[in-house]
Image (spheres, rainbow, N blue to C red):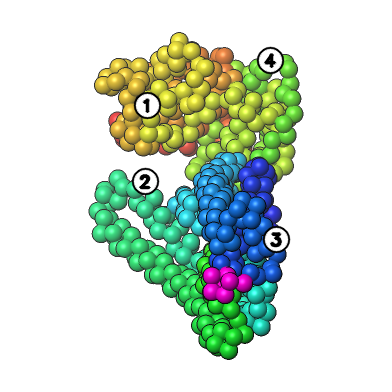
Amino acid sequence: MLNKIKWLWKFYRHYPGVVAILLILTPLQSMIQVTMPRLLGFSIDYSRSGELSDHWLARSVIDIANYFGFEPTTGFALVYIVGGFFSFGLYAYFQSWRAWMNCRSEWFFRQQSFDDITSKGPNFFNKFRTGDLITRLTDDVAEKLSWFACSGIFRFYEALLAVSFIVGMMLSIDPALTLWTAGPFPALIIIFFASSSLLDKRYDLLQASISKFNDVMESCFSGVRVVKAYVREKAQKKKFMETAVARRQNEINAIRVTTLVDSLYGYIWQLGVVIVLLAGGYRVLYSDLTIGSMATFIYYVVWLVFPMFDIGQFLVKSRQSAVSINRLQELENVPPMIKDNEVNPPQAVVRGRLSFENIDLSFDGATQKIIDNVSFEVGAGKTVALVGKVGSGKTWLINMVPRLVDPTSGKVKLDGVELRDYPVAELRKMIGYVPQEPSLFSDSIRNNILFGRPEIPETILEWAIEVAQLKDDIASFPKGLETEIGTRGVSISGGQKQRLGLARALVGKPKVLILDDCTSALDARTETDLWNRLHQVLPDMTAIIITHRPDTLEKVDMIYVTENGKIVESGTHIELMKKSGDYARIYRRYQLEEQVSA
């Protein structure tokens, strides 16, 4: 529990003023509110007997009434009304702050988790699926945590204060009768400890089922074309129904337990009300207790039901929120693969010379290395190609340049400076990266290319579009650059997506350009035009290319052949063809594939 409080404190420390308001005004409002029934009791007894109580509170009100020339009954009524309005005003004021803090906490926890997730590496996204992450950032934060983080805690604080003040007043009226009221407490404590583990289990199963439900929806919608192509609609409907039914059942199971525990807290405490009515009524009949005191006591006992409900609700919701906090902490506890040293970058102009020195890469727990002792160099302004089978380590090598992943051992250097010595943001500004499947967003073509870089001039944007062979396509779109392309670029072709991704990389005028088989969806003519134009601008950039196109391989300065995480061959196209090794076999296969497809 202390761990959870510490986790929540990182939110509260940003709003000390609001916390102070809630901490100070809540007990002040509770004290005023609890005082009101006692004044009513004094007024009832005075009306019946004409005798004034010696209690300090009654004497204070009478003194005020005498000062203003009022009768005692009028004084009690006026103080009751004024106190009631003041109590209501205070309550409305700090309630508004509680509502504000609820909304703020939802934003805070979701934003903090999102910021943390964006710093994670590929290993994180292999462990957590998209639907699960969405569930944790929406349902766990909004439905389970945001209300508890403020209203839940401060209603519990308010309830404890109310119970303390009410019990104090009850003791001042009749200690023996107050002890009768405390009868249900042992049963409530037993219920809390007995239900804690059951609540944890039910809430954990519920959140897991919601995550699985969202996973199924996300995978179906994102792969809807494949689903339709293979006529798997019925299978997807069945899978969706099964997860929906499982979620519904877990929702019902959780609500059953929650309702049972909530009801037990309320009904057991109401048993105390019945006990007080019987015992107090007996005392009144035998003149051991005044009518006013009995009325006040009943008022307090009935009033205790509401804070006891809040205490019970807090105990239930705390278990539910603890599960959600655990799920968010689970995300936080995965360390980022990349750590930014935040040192000042070298002041010299970057030319673009890259060197890989004895690079190894493996993930925790893996016995086999993904990259195994790789060393090679790319001269400034040179173009090299990585060739190899699927899974040979090509993409992992190029992912080290923008520091999407760091080597387990060895060093990657840019102009002789290790990449870790550059701030990540500064390093990535110098690099243009085009993956095989570019990530596109439901936005305009312009915004997809600029990608949050409004400072880029229009002339550079037009240049990047022209180099990427996208100019004619954009001219044919109804709104040109302002054309909306839909989620993941659903309204444009695969080749247009790849060229749009290339334009996005070029528009930043990078010193290092990384192309991960980014022309696989282009037809032969378009790709030829693209590479001819790229070769005109590449002398200003260092380029690393993963490709299987023979025409491209013939034009690069150096080729490195990878297999099982190692470089097994290197040289120019002509040199490697003369060796008749792995590269020659791969190249001839690529040529044959192109001839067949043509």
Q: Are marks 2 and 1 in contact (CB under 8 Å)?
A: no
Q: Which mark is in front, 1 or 4? A: 1
Give the distance between the C-alpha atoms of the residues marked 3 and 4, in whole angstroms. 51 Å
Q: Position of residue 443 (x, y in %)?
A: 38, 30
Q: Give the number of callouts.
A: 4
Q: Give residue 480's mark.
A: none
Residue receiving disc 2: 222
Residues shaded magenta: 44-51
**Magenta region includes residue 40:** no
Q: Secondary structure at mark 2?
A: helix
Amino acid type of the residue that numbered disc 2 sits on in the rendered structure: Ser
- Left or right: where does residue 177 sit relative to residue 457? right
Q: Position of residue 133 (x, y in %)?
A: 50, 51
Q: Which quadrant of the rendered structure holds the N terminus? A: bottom right
Q: Residues within 10 Å of mark 4 (few under 14, many from 20)?
A: few
In the displayed structure, 375 sits above or below 271; it is above
Viewer-closest of 552 and 59: 59
Label 3 or label 4, whichever comes before in sequence order: 3
Q: Which residue is mark 3?
A: 2
Secondary structure under tag 1 reads: loop
The quarter of the picture where residue 200 lies is bottom right
Q: Nearer the viewer, mark 1 or mark 3?
A: 3
Disc 4 element? loop
Label drawn at residue 349: 4
In the image, what residue occupies the spot 31% across and 58% down?
Answer: 236
Q: Position of residue 16 (x, y in %)?
A: 67, 44
